[in-house]
């Protein structure tokens, strides 16, 4: 058994390579946890039930957009009878999700979604900072 | 069964008559029904329009209150290069704004004097006809609206507009906006923009910003379809001109003389 050293070295290198993704993630500090979006403090209920928002918030926003711009309809009556002004910045980001970076962005970054709405629609927090 | 030559000809003639008669009746009835259906659409209850008194506007020389109010609220970038500038409302020398009214003897009082111009919200808008995506269209209340979400930046509308009312974003406008107004979205590179008669304010029952900002009340906004509105009263009482009426676009911005 003169090859023992070579065999064990080879095994070690093999194990190192096969577990490389684990080492890499550990070094980079990434985890397999979810995006952990931070929920707003001032409101408990969104304009639609949680399950609807999870799967269809983009559809709802597009409906709002078409309603306001193309049909001149500005008020949305939620499932629980509350009325909302249909505005992405004015309602979503001002009334509830004042921390867009910790809510929308966290989840979109996690899911790898590039939301182009922000090319035009303004995050009020950023606007305030740039005005200073 | 035998049929005589005379009977055959008689029958053929009758059938032919029946066919032609049915066609004629159908066409007449069809036409009647169509015109009856078209009638209700002609009734318009709101037709927004602007009446401008250039004499009042000229009272305060160098005033730009309406321009800055509009451009600030709508996040219109300030780009000084005329090839790239973006504008919703601006000043045009009289002889340019009213090229067809100009003569060698144009009143000295008007020669070279600035006139406020912006989108005319034409009744027959050429920009709407050429837009391939329906990103611009005429609303029932007459506003020529823009849907920035649908604009693909082909600039057909800019070529079609005889008034130069539309601007193109050649680059990202945000660095050229000194103070972002979060209540109104900006635009991006590759999108056309123009005045919308402040439809976001009309929806809340407010007048357009330029009207509100003018210290001389030189701009009057109102409903042409209402005979008792102030715009109608002004147009009934005084002579007015419009920009390039000979093109048949029917501008809804009137200038009192």
Image (cartoon, coloured by chain):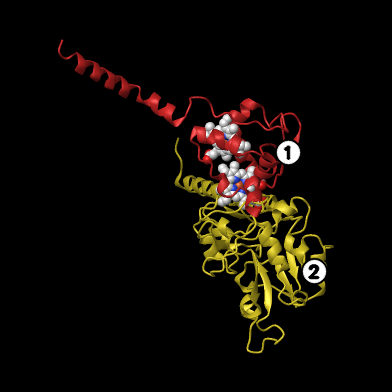
Kindly identify which residue carries mark 1: A84
Kindly identify which residue carries mark 2: B217
| Residue drawn at 84 percent across, 62 percent down | B228
Q: Are marks 1 and 2 in contact (CB under 8 Å)?
A: no
The numbered disc on residue A117 is none
Classify mark 2: residues with Cα within 10 Å, few (<14), some (14-19) or many (20+): some
Q: In the rendered view, does A81 fall on the left or right side of A92?
A: right
Colour chain B appears in = yellow
Quadrant that contains the N terminus of chain A: top left
Q: Position of residue A68 (x, y in %)?
A: 67, 46
Q: Nearer the viewer, residue B211 or B135?
A: B211
- Of all residues, the one furthest to the left in this rendering is A2
Evaluate whether label 1 is on the same chain as label 2.
no
- Of all residues, the one furthest to the bottom in this rendering is B105
Q: Nearer the viewer, residue B89 or B82?
A: B82
Q: Nearer the viewer, residue B161 or A110?
A: A110
Q: In the rendered view, does A3 fall on the left or right side of B66?
A: left
| Residue drawn at 60 percent across, 51 percent down | B147
The chain letter under disc 2 is: B
Q: In the rendered view, does B208 fall on the left or right side of B102?
A: right
Asked whether residue B132 is in view, the answer is yes
How many numbered marks, from 0 up? 2
Asked whether residue A58 is in view, the answer is no
Q: Position of residue B66 (x, y in %)?
A: 72, 66
Q: Which chain is red in the rendering?
A: A
| Residue drawn at 76 percent across, 31 percent down | A81
In three-dimensional space, the C-alpha distance between marks 1 and 2, rounded to whole angstroms, equals 34 Å
Q: Position of residue A83 (x, y in %)?
A: 75, 37
Classify mark 1: residues with Cα within 10 Å, few (<14), some (14-19) or many (20+): some
């Amino acid at each position: 058994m003169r090859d023992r050293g070579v065999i064990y070295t080879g095994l070690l290198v093999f194990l190192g390579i096969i577990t490389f993704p684990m080492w890499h993630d550990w070094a980079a500090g990434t985890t397999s946890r979810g995006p952990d979006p931070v929920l707003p403090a001032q409101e408990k209920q969104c304009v639609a039930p949680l399950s609807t928002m999870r799967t269809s918030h983009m559809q709802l926003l597009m409906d709002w957009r078409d309603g306001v711009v193309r049909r001149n309809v500005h008020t949305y009556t939620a499932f629980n009878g509350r009325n909302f002004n249909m505005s992405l910045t004015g309602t979503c980001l001002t009334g509830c999700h004042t921390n867009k970076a910790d809510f929308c962005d966290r989840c979109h970054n996690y899911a790898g979604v590039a939301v182009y709405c922000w090319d035009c629609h303004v995050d009020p927090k950023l606007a305030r900072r740039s005005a200073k | 069964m035998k049929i005589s030559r005379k009977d055959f000809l008689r029958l053929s003639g009758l059938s032919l008559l029946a066919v032609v008669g049915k066609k004629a009746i159908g066409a007449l009835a069809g036409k009647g029904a169509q015109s009856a259906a078209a009638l209700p659409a002609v009734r318009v209850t709101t037709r927004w329009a602007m009446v401008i008194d250039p004499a009042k506007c000229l009272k305060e020389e160098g005033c730009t209150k309406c321009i800055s109010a509009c451009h600030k609220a709508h996040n219109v970038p300030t780009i000084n290069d005329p090839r790239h500038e973006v504008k919703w409302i601006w000043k045009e020398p009289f002889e340019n704004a009213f090229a067809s009214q100009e003569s060698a003897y144009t009143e000295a009082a008007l020669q070279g004097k600035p006139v406020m111009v912006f989108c005319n919200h034409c009744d027959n808008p050429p920009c709407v006809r050429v837009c391939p995506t329906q990103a611009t269209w005429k609303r029932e209340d007459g506003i020529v609206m823009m849907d920035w979400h649908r604009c693909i930046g082909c600039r057909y509308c800019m070529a079609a507009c005889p008034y130069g009312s539309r601007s193109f974003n050649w680059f990202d406008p945000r660095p050229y906006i000194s103070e972002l107004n979060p209540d109104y979205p900006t635009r991006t590179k590759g999108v056309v923009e123009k005045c919308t008669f402040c439809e976001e304010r009309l929806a809340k029952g407010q007048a357009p910003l330029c009207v509100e900002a003018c210290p001389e009340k030189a701009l009057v906004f109102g409903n042409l379809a209402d005979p008792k509105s102030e715009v109608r009263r002004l147009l009934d009482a005084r002579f007015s001109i419009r920009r390039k009426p000979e093109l048949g676009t029917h501008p809804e911005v009137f200038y009192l003389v």
